[in-house]
Amino acid sequence: MSFERRDSLSVGQSLLIRATLALALMGVALAGHWFDRGGLRDNVDGSVSFIDVLYFTAVTITTVGYGDIVPVTQQARLFDTFVVTPIRLFIWLIFLGTAYTFVFQRSWDRIKTRMISKALKDHYIVCGFGSGGEAAVTELMRQGVDPNSIVVIDCDPERAACAVVLGVTVLTGDATHNATLDAACIHCATALLVSAGRDDTAALVVLSARQLNPSIPISASVRAIENEDLLRQAGASSIINPVSLGGHLLARSSTHRGAVDYIRDLAAADGRVALHERFATDAEIGRSLRSIGPGLGVRLMREGQPIGFWEAGADRIQAGDAIIEIVQVIER
C-alpha cells in the first residue's frame, strides 16, 4: 500500500532537478580526483592538468576508460572504488529512471490507451468523480453494470486514483475538451453521466458531448435551479438537482415518512422495488398501461412526452412507447 499525491512539479522542473543532481554527483567525483591528482598518471604526456582530471572523471563515470589516465596510488584506487563507483550507479539510475518516465512509460500509456479505446463499446461515461460521481458509479455497479464498462473522466489525479480502486476504467483529463470525450469513445457509449461539481463546467461538458454524439442520453447534476434550463438547452436528457430533490424529500418526510422511504427504495439498486424503463413489447401494443404485468405501469414516454397512468393516452399503448414500471427486485 502506498500514498499517492498529485505531482507538484512540471516536466521541465523534474528534468532540471535530475540534471542538477547528476551534475552535483559528477562534481563530487571531479573534486576528489582534482585534490588527489597526484595519485593519477597520464600515460601520454606525464602531467595531469584540470582538463585531464575532467576528462578522466567523465570517462570513469561513463565506464569508458581508455587507459591513457589511470589511478596509480592506493588512495586514488580506493576513492574510485568506494566513491566514484556508487556515483556512477546513481547517475545511471537517474538516466534510466528519466528514460523510463519520459519515454517508455508514456509510450506504453499511449499504447494502453489505444487498446482500451478499441475495446470500449456500449459503456457508461461518468464525468467527475466527486461525491456525486462516486455515488453514481457505485449505484451502476449495484445494478449489475460491469466495472470494465464504466469510464470515469476526472482531471484530478487523486480522485482518478480513487476511481481505479473500484475497478473502473479511468481517463485523467478535462471532460470539457472534445479530445477527452473522443478518447473515451463517446460515439459508441450507452449513456453519459455528468457530475462536474460546477454548473458552468457541466454545461460545457454537455455541449461538447452533444456535439460529438447527438443521440446519447445525457444525465447531468445541477446545483442551482436557475441553471436547469441552461443544461436542458445544452442538450441534457435528464437533469438532477440534488439540493432541490433533497429539500422536497426532507419536507415530505415530516408528514409522509412512509412515502419518502418508498421513494428512496425505488431509487436505490439494493431496495425491494425499483423503477424500470423499457420499450413496449408487441404483445402490449393496443393494451392499456394498467393492464400490463408483472410490473406496475406508472407512466408512458411517447415521443419524449410523459403520459401518466390516469391520462387518456395511457389507455392504448402504441409502438415505440417506453414504459416506466415499478418492479420487484429479485435478490441475487
Image: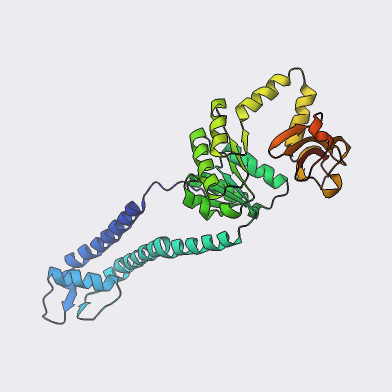
Locate residue 264: give its quadrant. Answer: top right
Position in image of residue 200 (x %, y %): 49, 34
Way the structure is coloured? rainbow
In the rendered structure, the answer to whether residue 317 lies left or right of residue 208 reads: right
Image vertical order of residue 186 relative to residue 271, above or below: below
Locate residue 93: give its quadrant. Answer: bottom left
Front residue of this view, candidates 271 and 199: 199
Position in image of residue 126 (x %, y %): 59, 45
In the rendered structure, the answer to whether residue 207 lies left or right of residue 133 reads: left
Res. 317 visible in picture: yes
Front residue of this view, candidates 87 and 92: 92
In the rendered structure, the answer to whether residue 317 lies left or right of residue 109 reads: right
Position in image of residue 151 (x %, y %): 59, 51
Locate residue 231: give its quadrant. Answer: top right
> Which residue is found at the position 77% from the left and 28% from the top?
261
In the rendered structure, the answer to whether residue 52 lies left or right of residue 203 reads: left
| Count of numbered marks | 0
Image vertical order of residue 39 relative to residue 225, above or below: below
> Which residue is found at the position 59% from the left and 40% from the top?
133
Position in image of residue 179 (x %, y %): 47, 52
Res. 75 visible in picture: no
> Which residue is found at the position 54% from the left and 47% from the top?
153
